[in-house]
Image (cartoon, coloured by chain):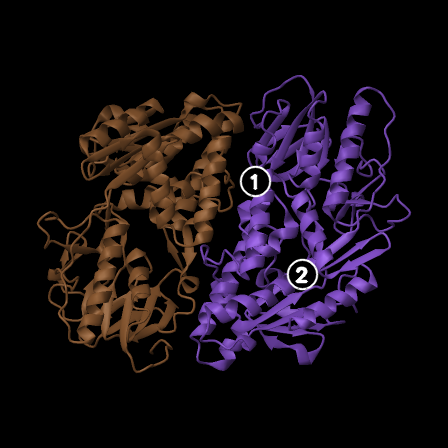
Chain colours: A purple, B brown
Amino acid sequence: MPVNIPETGQARVVIIGGGYGGITLGKALKKSPFQVIMLDKNNYHCFQPLLYQVATGGLEPDSIAFPLRKLFEKQKNFYFRMSEVERIDTAIKRVYTHLGHVNYDYLVIASGGKTNFYGNEELESQTQGMKNVPEALNLRSLILQNFEQANHESDPEVRNALLNFVVVGGGPTGVETAGALAELKKHILPKDYPEMATEDMQIHLIEGGNRLLAGMSEKSSEDSLKALEKLGVDVAFNTFVKGYDGLNITTSKEALDMAAETVIWSAGITGNIIPGLKPEAIERGRIRVDAYNKIIGYEDVYAIGDVALMKTEAAYPQGHPQVAPAAIQQAEQLAANLVRMQIQEQVQPFEYFDKGSMATIGRNKAVVDWKNIHLKGFIAWLGWMFVHLMYLIGFRNKLVVFANWVWSYLTYDKGTRLIIRPYHKTKSEKATKG
Amino acid sequence: MPVNIPETGQARVVIIGGGYGGITLGKALKKSPFQVIMLDKNNYHCFQPLLYQVATGGLEPDSIAFPLRKLFEKQKNFYFRMSEVERIDTAIKRVYTHLGHVNYDYLVIASGGKTNFYGNEELESQTQGMKNVPEALNLRSLILQNFEQANHESDPEVRNALLNFVVVGGGPTGVETAGALAELKKHILPKDYPEMATEDMQIHLIEGGNRLLAGMSEKSSEDSLKALEKLGVDVAFNTFVKGYDGLNITTSKEALDMAAETVIWSAGITGNIIPGLKPEAIERGRIRVDAYNKIIGYEDVYAIGDVALMKTEAAYPQGHPQVAPAAIQQAEQLAANLVRMQIQEQVQPFEYFDKGSMATIGRNKAVVDWKNIHLKGFIAWLGWMFVHLMYLIGFRNKLVVFANWVWSYLTYDKGTRLIIRPYHKTKSEKATKG
């Protein structure tokens, strides 16, 4: 059965996903001759780079997410349907969702990324991901529940497991999460749990390569390592996680094996692939596209953003970094090209404009790389905040997040540490323990 | 096994519950010779009168809740244990929790109230309560999910059921919820769902008595009725809900029976009774106390706030209203009396100071009764906001809620309408549907 959407007689662009790629494309097609239909399983857009602050009690989910309907208020050619996409059938130009099917003239897959567990099902079921709002809220609850439990736990072994926090992966998410946990330890734990010894909380960051922030400059790697170590984070390089049964983590370095109730997995992302594409269009979990974001082997199906793999630019032989600016730029170029095609104009290939990269470690500590410039410390930290505020959607969210940051900075406090969504490891997970 | 709490040699006051009664008592005992132990299943205090704004997308839960540990930071004689109380054994002066037991010298039950379904299990399992944060968030999700589904629903019967909202109970919570739903209908629906006819959303308020806000003046009843009707709410008096199977609601007036996916139950509260008290100490779901808040038949067990029923004051033969000021005043008096007993001074009986009552219906609309004064309209609405801000715990929460209200007022917008916690009626509930 078709999903109930008015037929307007316009050619239909169906966008799967309301991330940066999807919303930029939708907006850019505002005055175009197309009917624009967006499908997303959530009714909101979420700014993933700040999810770690939701998980560590710094921000509310509503501050970093934005209702998609509100974003497209008054855009007459835009139709939103909250629905989970199940598969596509490109032969009959149709998307199947749990609500029914939607026909398209052009399809744009902007379905983003998800946590990459490299096929290890145990790690997938036992560790905490942080790629969406519910995952971040679950992690927040788990952290706080572990503090509560450790506070009255008399068995030192059990208490140590509750207070061992392991972050896997030394990319921006891992570095920022480890830094935020260290700030919790330093500023919140002594105030909220005066009965506990703060130093009982241990934060471990495990990285497979030989440096942090591998996508950034060597200087950024060094500076972020120094900053984390100063905050008391144990960083282990050249170490791979082999398994985690919900309590015991095993790694390629035996000395690092330990009992830990919280293992946060931020060791990579992979694309949200929509079933129904030819196998040859998929490479390493992403969808191969040409310089026009058109999927290899298709005429009317496109992919943009984190899920898309474009290898046409010499500077990016392995595709572009999976970051918001790439998604936004691709969406803008694709919108222009779709309009050009309608009026028989020549389409233009995509060229990525690198806006640099950055990561924050904590209070007054961040690293920024932009062309050949490297910044660190307070000025980098201000830059990080400014850029992240700019990317946040909506004036209200910018204001709320800014106010939260100022408040936290002045008071050394995290505003939001309520256990509203108690997180229970499932019975089967508990059963696997020791 | 005992819960691990240091023995300080001080006499122990154990407080069950972190509502207004509990936190006021805990604070008031700061410089007392007692060790104060608070038990609550949540790690936060919640301001229940604003839960309806969480449910209708106006506020975040973090704005109206406050972490208990933070509230008692630096109070050296205070110990918090997040734990669910299972029962008490007054013979051996012990509270049993899911963590283990806690011994007391004095026990204060400040466990507050919960939704009263008057023993109807079907209503309890099928309607939406709004007495705690998870219930309010579930209701928010249900409302928004129903809008999403109605937006593409082609069967008019199904769509009507999705857009029929029934509020049961015409007390402050029912009136405020109906008003907030009406504002959603007026200001948000047309912007977010331009494909839907706004008038398809119907809001019904069902009250068993013959007027709204029965605890307030006749004028307030009339004014609130006028305001709700102006907002398009259907109000039915002298009507009792007989049943609700998850889709069809049946009442004492056949003409009102209808299909409605959302039925909000705000028809009364009853005390959270802790198992282990003598039956004669319980009356109509509350715990009977004397003028010193001491439970009838006990020497060292007290009850304060919504759960306590004190009938010693001539002006309140059926006990005091179940509102924050009564709980706060009882807690203050009890704290003073506990200290007096320690120093062999005469204890003082409780006298309630009525601070008046108020309810808001919507933008610029509220009613206030204070002694013989009745206010309505804009000035009452300002008063309502001021008083609610004052009762909110914490400067940050006051600021955030105030900013939210100013923002909503200026933009006619509700900031937070994300479906983060999808609410699914359970299978058994779905199965009971016609």
Q: Quick one: quadrant of the N terminus of chain B?
A: bottom left
Q: Seen in the image, is B256 located left or right of residue A244? A: left
Q: Which mark is residue A396?
A: 1
The residue that appears at 78% across and 67% down in the rendered structure is A222
In front: A408, or A135? A408
Q: Position of residue A264 (x, y in %)?
A: 61, 63
Q: Is residue B205 visible?
A: yes
Q: Is residue B276 visible?
A: no
Tag 1 and tag 2, C-beta contact below 8 Å? no
Q: CA distance from mark 1 to mark 2?
A: 25 Å
Q: Which mark is residue A364?
A: 2
In front: B134, or B215? B215
In front: B44, or A414? A414
Query: Of label 1 and label 2, which has the lower sequence position?
Result: 2
Q: Position of residue A22 (x, y in %)?
A: 68, 37
Q: Quick one: quadrant of the C terminus of chain B?
A: top left
